[in-house]
Image (tube, rainbow, N blue to C red):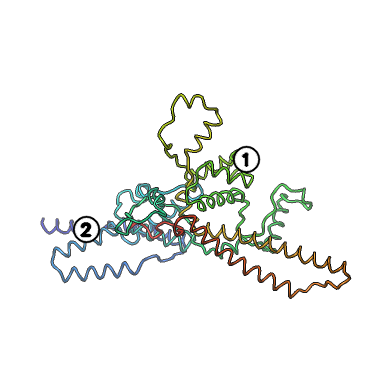
């Protein structure tokens, strides 16, 4: 009886049963076919296991037991096939939540992917990341906590390190090269012609511009217009830029004043986002959606000097009360903005926009000056032929000045933000 009990205990420690292995292998074969049959095993893990086994053999029995427990803790006792199968489940879960802009919590992953073995989370997460990056050009990234966002720009603690915190909340973001995305947004004439032909066959576009029931295609691989109105993306970028340029915190009255300079008001009508049941929405509705999606954060702050006197509050006008209520809110970046956009990218957007506007204005003035010179020379009876070489030299000189202007602007944005700018944040490598 003793040898039989020993064999049973060894079988339990050896991992899943043979039938379970067969089920995991069959499921894994299907997943490998679905994702191109790629091998996502990490050689480093094998090397670590070999080294650990070698140390266990040369050490005492207690050391061997400790090494065995450590290795089992990394995978939770899951075999390679089972890890791949569950990693594919995590990939499907992440891709399903992405169109809804939903976050994924660690507790949800454990509940749906690893309900009976949470110790294998790290191993499953690592393989899922490789599948997402190699097959879909995406990755899961852990969001910053509120305290981490609030600590951006503040002085470090006395020990020079910040407390390590974890939100245990993840979202998907693209890993595609920005140059590739930029190229995919350019119009391709051949692609445009093929799209128009297809829509005409379907009867959605007629020969005349007014004879159509469908928006004409852009001719680009990434058709942004068919997914989300560009105006909504531009407004989000504008609000993030205003917040960053005002020291990462923007009181609501100041936000309204700055938006007013762009002829934008909280009650301005905007197109509705994709898949919305409404034809239009207000600017404040759009900003509220961005708060729900964690791109923006609207924080209520305490009033200076404590609560107002009740008698005085009753005598205030409705307008004064509304203005006082607005003063209680501050706008900041949300966790999704830090993870998907990044302060550095927004600062570069500001500088590129301002640099382009500056250059266009200077080129316009240059053209006006040349026209005035030709007009003056014509009145005097002189030959005012245009010198193309001189024009090109002046344009090159203006472009060089525009680049230097953009560099100064970037330094100004950093100075106004109060500290060095952060790039896209998060921990794509997974939990520690």
In the picture as drawn, the residue positioned furthest to the left comes out as: 2
Crowd around label 1: few <14 · some 14–19 · many ≥20 (10 Å) = few
Q: Which residue is mark 1?
A: 268
Residue 320 seen from this side: yes
Disc 2 to disc 1: CB gap under 8 Å = no
| Image location of residue 254, percent across then percent down | 54, 44
Crowd around label 2: few <14 · some 14–19 · many ≥20 (10 Å) = few
Kindly report which numbered mark, 2 or 1, lies closer to the viewer in this rendering.
Answer: 1
Near-viewer residue (186 or 296): 296
| Image location of residue 81, percent across then percent down | 35, 60
Near-viewer residue (129 or 352): 352
Near-viewer residue (366 or 106): 366
Q: Which part of the image, by quadrant, shows the C terminus?
A: bottom left
**For the residue labelled by badge 2, is the local secondary structure a helix, a strand or a loop?**
helix
Q: Residue at x 68, y 55 (%)?
A: 217
Asked if 42 appears above or below 306 in the picture, the reply is below
| Image location of residue 148, percent across then percent down | 38, 51
Mark 2 vs mark 1, CA separation in Å: 65 Å
In the picture as drawn, the residue positioned furthest to the bottom comes out as: 389
Q: Which residue is mark 2?
A: 13
Q: Residue at x 49, y 24 (%)?
A: 314
**Left or right side of 132 for 46:** left
């Amino acid at each position: 009886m003793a040898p039989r009990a020993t064999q049973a205990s060894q079988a339990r420690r050896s991992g899943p049963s043979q039938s379970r292995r067969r089920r995991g292998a069959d499921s894994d074969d299907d997943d490998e076919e679905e994702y191109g049959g790629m091998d996502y095993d990490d050689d480093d893990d094998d090397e670590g296991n070999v080294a650990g086994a070698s140390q266990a053999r040369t050490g005492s029995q207690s050391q061997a037991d400790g090494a065995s427990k450590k290795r089992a803790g990394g995978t939770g006792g899951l075999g390679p096939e089972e890890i791949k199968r569950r990693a594919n489940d995590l990939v499907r879960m992440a891709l399903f939540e992405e169109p809804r802009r939903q976050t994924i919590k660690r507790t949800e992953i454990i509940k749906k992917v690893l309900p009976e073995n949470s110790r294998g989370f790290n191993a499953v997460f690592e393989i899922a990341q490789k599948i997402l990056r190699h097959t879909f050009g995406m990755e899961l990234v852990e969001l910053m906590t509120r305290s981490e966002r609030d600590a951006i720009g503040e002085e470090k603690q006395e020990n020079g390190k910040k407390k390590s915190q974890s939100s245990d909340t993840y979202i998907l973001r693209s890993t595609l090269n920005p140059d590739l995305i930029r190229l995919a947004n350019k119009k391709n004439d051949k692609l445009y012609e093929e799209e128009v032909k297809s829509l005409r066959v379907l009867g959605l576009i007629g020969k005349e511009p007014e004879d159509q029931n469908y928006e004409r295609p852009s001719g680009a691989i990434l058709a942004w217009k068919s997914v989300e109105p560009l105006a909504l993306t531009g407004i989000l970028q504008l609000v993030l830029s205003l917040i960053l340029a005002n020291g990462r915190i923007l009181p609501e009255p100041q936000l309204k004043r700055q938006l007013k300079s762009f002829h934008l008001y909280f009650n301005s009508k905007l197109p509705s986002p994709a898949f919305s049941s409404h034809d239009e929405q207000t600017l404040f509705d759009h900003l509220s959606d961005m708060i729900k999606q964690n791109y923006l954060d609207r924080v209520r702050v305490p009033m200076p000097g404590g609560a107002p006197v009740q008698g005085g509050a009753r005598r205030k006008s409705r307008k004064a009360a509304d203005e006082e209520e607005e003063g209680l809110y501050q706008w900041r970046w949300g966790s999704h903005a830090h993870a998907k956009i990044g302060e550095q990218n927004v600062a570069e957007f500001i500088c590129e926009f301002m640099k382009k506007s500056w250059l266009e204005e200077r080129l316009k003035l240059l053209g006006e000056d040349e026209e005035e010179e030709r007009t003056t020379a014509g009145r005097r009876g002189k030959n005012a032929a245009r010198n193309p070489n001189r024009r090109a030299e002046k344009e090159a000189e203006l472009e060089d000045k525009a680049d230097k202007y953009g560099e100064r602007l970037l330094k100004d944005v950093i100075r106004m933000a109060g500290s060095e700018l952060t790039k896209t944040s998060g921990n794509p490598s997974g939990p520690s």
